[in-house]
Structure formats: structure tokens, C-alpha cells
Amino acid sequence: MFGSSNPYSQAGETQVNVSTRNLRSTDHYNGTEEQIQRQTLQTYVVNTQHAVDVTVSHVFTPRFSMSVGVPYVAASWGIPSPTTPVPGPRANEDAHGLGDISVSGRFWVLPTSKFKSGNFALGVGVKMPTGNPGYKDVYPDRNGQNPLPRFVDQSVQPGDGGWGIMFEVSGFKRIPHAQLFGSGNYLANPRDRNTTTSGSINRLPPNTPFAVVDTSYNSVPDQFMVRLGGAVPIGRTGFAGTLAWRVEGLPRYDLIGDSHGFRRPGVEMFIEPGVSYAKGRHIYSFNMPIGYYRNRFTNPYTGSRGDATFPNYIFLASYGYRFGAKTGKTDTAICQ
């Protein structure tokens, strides 16, 4: 944290953080190639994601803390039905509800009493399958007929149906007039696939025969995120400007276990400008990752190229409040 000789939270301190994530995806990619014809033909998918995450963190010692994260998800996936010969009305598949709750611990590797200008932390946690992986909504089949309760698209399901293991590494380094930071997170989902059928089956007309294949049910895939950047205080106003490189993705193959079922593996890279403000026990931040590279990987096992939508922007905002320990004056909080 800028404005303090001690960049670490104190033992006994608790922080409640409320963060939001909002995006809209309409641009399709197959590999790194944008599928512009989907826009031209008006057959593109509209995928909207809104999530609120409440995280409570407690510092037990200067080097060890634990956190509990509780997300709430509201999302929608929609495609014209039918898509040919003329696109019909957009059939939206809406879902909302509690997401997958996580519990994690974090430990500063170097002694915090000595290393005030830089350090790195390691974390591990568990993601619990509290979100519904089989949410249903009423929408028509692929011909635009027979509206019935059907499983919504995998991308908007509140949960994935699997227990997960979370790994984290993060760190910071103070330099003159600025601070560098970085973090990496990986969610390993050992479960192979869940019992929710995939979109290719869900949108079939009633009583349509189909062969059960590997992608008939949704996969329970791993996920990853990496973020590297720096922050500079804006005078003594309590504000700081940040700029980071961010990458988010879903791998082709899981770290633990098999990788069968339907998934949309891929990666997107962003340039992420942002601003934060800290005053006393209150911390505010707003970041807007701007996508510049997208790659939809081929499906595991099947080798199908498929396609997927990627957002051009993500809007991230958060508010944090610290209590439970004597907190000194903090101008700008940027320890990531």
C-alpha cells in the first residue's frame, strides 16, 4: 500500500470486499480468426455475464490469511432460432443464482517484518460445487418452436458441478514512485463431466433421436488467469492509476483427471487500465480490461475447431472495507 511504511495487513484484521464483473460477448472466433460472417448473417450469439462476489478475508498472522468467496451469477446466452434460411427471433437462455463458493488460504513466503519493499505469496483453496450446473429456462428448439424447460448453455450455468482445487501465486515489488505487482490463479477441476446435456442436444426438437457421443454432456473444465502490472500514486489524493496485462482462459486438457465432455477451450489477452482510491478503511477500484488477442482452441479428443464468443471489454469494480485491527492512514491501496 502506498502511504504506509508497512505494505501488509495486520494480524486480526478482516476485510469485506464486494466486487462485480460485467461483460457482453458477440464476436465469434475459430482459432485466432474472427468469424465475421456471423455478424453479416446476423446469426451471432449474444452472451452477457453479470456476477457479484462477496469475499471475506481474515489475517491470522502477519504472514497467513484465509478468505471465503461467495458469488452470485446472472447471465444470458441467446441465438436466433432458427438461424437459416432467415434468422428468427433471438431465443435467450437466462440463468441466475448462487455460484460455486470457495475457501482459500494465503501465505507470504518471505518474513514480512524484513521484506517491506517486495514479497510473494502462495495460496491454495477449495472450490465447492454449490452452484447449480443444471439450470433450466424455457426457450424454443433450434427451429424456433416448442418452447420448453431446457438446460441453459454451459457458459451461463451458475455452477459446474465439480469440486475444485485452487492454486495461487502473487507478489509485489516497490520501485521509486511506483509499485509492480503480479498474480496467477489456476482452478483444477478433477471431475470429468457432469450430468447436464450440452447445447447441441438441448436445442433439438422434441422426440428427435440422437446418438450419445463424448460431447453430449458438459465437461467440468479447468480455468486460469494471470495478471502483471504496475501502479502509480496520483500525488497525495488517495488515488492511484494502474496498468496491467491480463490473460484469462480455459485449457484444452485438465491438470488432474480426464477432459471429456463439451467445453469451449480458449484464451483471451487484455490490456487493463484502472484506477483505485483508498481512504482510511475504505478501498475502491475500477478496472476495464480491453481484449486484443483471442484464440479458440480445438476441442480435446474430438479435435473439432468449433467457435466461441469473446468480449471486447470487461468491466470490473470493487469496494472493500477493513476492520478489526488498528489501521494506519493509507493513501492508496494497490497490493494485489
Image (tube, helix red, strand yellow):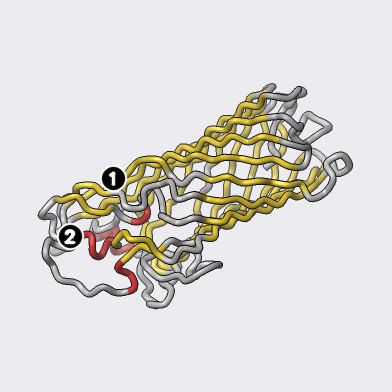
Q: Amino acid at mark 1?
A: Asp
Task: Identify the residue at the far right of this view.
Answer: 114
Nearer the observer, 207 or 156:
207
| Disc marking residue 142 | 2
Q: Is residue 278 above or below residue 8?
A: above
| Disc marking residue 21 | none
The location of residue 247, given as percent across then percent down, is 56, 56
* Residue 15 visible in the shown view: yes
Q: Amino acid at mark 2?
A: Arg
Quarter holding the C terminus?
top right
Which secondary structure lies at badge 2? loop
Crowding at mark 1 (Cα within 10 Å: few <14, some 14-19, many 20+): many
Measure how far apart labels 1 and 2 are at the Cα level: 16 Å
Q: Left or right: 286 with respect to 162?
A: right
Q: Residue 5 sits in which quadrant?
A: top right
| Among the two numbered marks 1 and 2 on one chain, the one whose residue lies closer to the N terminus | 1
Crowding at mark 2 (Cα within 10 Å: few <14, some 14-19, many 20+): many
Q: Left or right: 296 with respect to 233?
A: left
* Residue that appears at 35% across and 65% down: 35
Q: Is residue 321 above or below residue 7?
A: above
Q: Are marks 1 and 2 in contact (CB under 8 Å)?
A: no
Nearer the observer, 6 or 239:
6
The location of residue 226, given as percent across then percent down, is 61, 55
* Residue that appears at 43% across and 74% down: 300
Quarter holding the N terminus?
top right
| Count of numbered circles in the view | 2
The location of residue 117, given as percent across then percent down, is 83, 42
Residue that carries the numbered disc 1 in the rendered image: 94
